[in-house]
């Protein structure tokens, strides 16, 4: 019989869970959404949702994992055993929560490969001089050098595949060492380094010319920029930022020791993750505003990290050195999250197929290679493939955007709805509250219970309605 794996200490659990949450969602996605949806007003909306909606789901998922010692499928199955009709069918939520990371890991490794490429590129040359061929290839398009470089890279065939496989290999090696010697040790080393890097770059950006305007844009809410999309975007971001509705926190909860304080552990994850997201915005947005004003920040979009930031670094003293540090930081963040996604998949496969960890890793690697390679080629030889072309609103989406849309905008809200129903109707809100608080006072218990019973499902339905286009 295999020894049950788990974290050896509370700090190991917190750093691993925080490492899962602190990924591209914080360093890449959060800053560009903040810039797109009004700066300070988006930040304020996000913080409110983190302390309510996000906190409730984060606590619930960790509790579900610790109560059962199982991954999403096993946990939902155990709680729903013997239940009839609707309550018995809630077990499908475990499958949805398990499918999500299997969809995300391949395209996450593709983006991780892009980051890996940029680490090497920044070490060699400032982005303004990355590639003369790239600029010439897109001559006459009024495309900045950094845009031309990025387009030239992702639309090539073999180089992106090579970096995708390199990033995947790093994660597979860590996962192969197991929870204690791999996942826990990896995060104990990388997370402190990541925090030091992000603080150092924040300090650098604070001394840039006109950085004050960027700080005001980021930190001062402007009510005139608020809309329902501010709330919808902030809720969507929570899934990535807190690693909820993708089976990760249920799996890590299963690895958690019974004697560890669940409430304080989740509080520390919440503080750690939100702090890094805040610092990421503080690092990137003032920098971009200082470079090109508010319009540059608002229009940067998903290219903020790979196109806009290299232009920023190339324009300031010491920019190449800071650019190298920045992309190493992003690489570390991507790796800690990818490890958690891969670990969740491996744990699920081990439990459900009753096979060894090595065999589970092999099966997962095969899945990542196939879907990841197709995703990479979606920018070159498979660029004609538009999986959702039959839906007018999404007809132009490439393969990566489609996978992101299906996982983040459709399956994750649905999975979170099933988790909420499991907690409220199957387990019972009082029973799970007792598991969470133990024999200690839990000052935010009312927040948890109110959100799970009243707030979470309506909010998730808004996200789904927006994804379908029914909200505009």
Image (cartoon, rainbow, N blue to C red):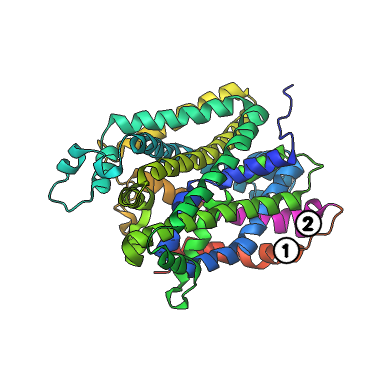
Is residue 414 shown in magenta?
A: yes
Instruction: Give the percent coordinates (x, y) of residue 195.
Output: 56, 46
- Which sits in the foreground, 244 or 338? 338
Instruction: Give the percent coordinates (x, y) of residue 228.
Output: 47, 71
Left or right placement of residue 317 versus residue 171 in this view:
left
Residue closest to the far bottom: 224
Q: How many discs mark residues in the rendered view? A: 2
- Which sits in the foreground, 103 or 279? 279
Q: What secondary structure prevails in the magenta region? A: helix
Residue placed under numbered mark 1 in the picture: 449
Residue closest to the far right: 439
Q: Residue at x 46, y 73 (%)?
A: 226
Q: Residue at x 60, y 61 (%)?
A: 50
- Span shown in magenta: 412-438
Q: Residue at x 23, y 50 (%)?
A: 144
Instruction: Give the percent coordinates (x, y) of residue 54.
Output: 61, 58
Label at residue 433: 2
Please rate how many residues cluster around mark 2, counting C-alpha atoms within 10 Å: few if below 14, some from 14 to 19, many from 20.
Answer: some
Instruction: Give the spatial CA distance, label 2 vs label 1.
Output: 8 Å
Left or right placement of residue 306 versus residue 236 in this view:
left
Instruction: Check if mark 2's residue and mark 1's residue have beta carbons within 8 Å.
Output: yes
Classify residue 130 by image quadrant: top left
From the image, which quarter does the N terminus lie in?
top right
From the image, which quarter does the C terminus lie in?
bottom left
Q: Secondary structure at mark 2?
A: helix
Res. 384 visible in picture: no
Res. 218 visible in picture: yes
Classify residue 468 by image quadrant: bottom left
Q: Secondary structure at mark 1?
A: helix
Mark 2 or mark 1, which has the lower sequence index? 2
Please rate how many residues cluster around mark 1, counting C-alpha atoms within 10 Å: few if below 14, some from 14 to 19, many from 20.
Answer: some
Instruction: Give the percent coordinates (x, y) of residue 373.
Output: 36, 32
């Amino acid at each position: 019989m295999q020894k049950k794996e788990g974290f050896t200490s509370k700090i190991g659990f917190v750093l691993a869970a925080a490492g899962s949450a602190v990924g591209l969602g914080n360093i890449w996605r959060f800053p560009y959404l903040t810039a797109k949806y009004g700066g300070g007003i988006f930040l304020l909306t996000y913080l409110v949702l983190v302390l309510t909606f996000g906190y409730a789901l984060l606590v619930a998922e960790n509790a579900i994992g610790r109560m059962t010692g199982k991954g999403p499928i096993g946990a939902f199955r155990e709680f729903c055993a013997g239940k009839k009709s609707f309550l018995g069918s809630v077990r499908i939520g475990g499958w949805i929560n398990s499918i999500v990371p299997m969809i995300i890991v391949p395209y996450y490794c593709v983006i991780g490969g892009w980051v890996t490429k940029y680490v090497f590129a920044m070490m060699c040359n400032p982005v303004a001089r990355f590639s003369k061929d790239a600029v010439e290839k897109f001559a006459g398009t009024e495309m900045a050098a950094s845009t031309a470089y990025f387009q030239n890279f992702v639309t090539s065939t073999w180089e992106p595949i090579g970096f995708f496989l390199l990033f995947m290999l790093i994660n597979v090696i860590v996962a192969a060492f197991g929870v204690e010697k791999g996942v826990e040790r990896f995060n104990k080393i990388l997370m402190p380094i990541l925090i030091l890097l992000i603080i150092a770059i924040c300090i650098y950006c604070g001394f840039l010319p006109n950085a004050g305007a960027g700080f005001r844009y980021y930190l001062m809410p402007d009510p005139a920029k608020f809309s329902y999309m501010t709330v919808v975007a902030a809720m969507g971001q929570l899934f990535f930022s807190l690693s909820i509705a993708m089976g990760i926190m249920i799996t890590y909860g299963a690895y958690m020791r019974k004697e560890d304080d669940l409430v304080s552990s989740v509080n520390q994850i919440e503080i750690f993750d939100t702090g890094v997201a805040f610092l990421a915005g503080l690092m990137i947005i003032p920098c971009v505003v200082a470079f090109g004003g508010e319009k540059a920040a608002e229009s940067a979009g998903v290219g903020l990290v790979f196109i806009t930031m290299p232009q920023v670094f190339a324009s300031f003293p010491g920019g190449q050195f800071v650019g190298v540090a920045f992309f190493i930081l992003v690489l570390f963040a991507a790796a800690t999250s990818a490890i958690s996604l891969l670990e969740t998949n491996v744990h699920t496969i081990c439990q459900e197929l009753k096979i060894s960890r090595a065999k589970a890793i092999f099966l997962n690697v095969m899945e990542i290679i196939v879907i990841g390679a197709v995703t990479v080629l979606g920018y070159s030889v498979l660029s004609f493939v538009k999986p959702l072309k039959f839906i007018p609103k999404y007809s132009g989406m490439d393969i990566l955007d489609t996978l992101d849309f299906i996982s983040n905008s459709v399956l994750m809200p649905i999975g979170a709805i099933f988790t909420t129903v499991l907690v409220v109707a199957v387990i019972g809100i009082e029973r799970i509250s007792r598991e969470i608080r133990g024999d200690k006072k839990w000052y935010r218990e009312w927040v948890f219970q109110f959100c799970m019973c009243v707030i979470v499902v309506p909010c998730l339905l808004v996200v789904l309605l927006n994804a379908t286009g029914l909200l505009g």
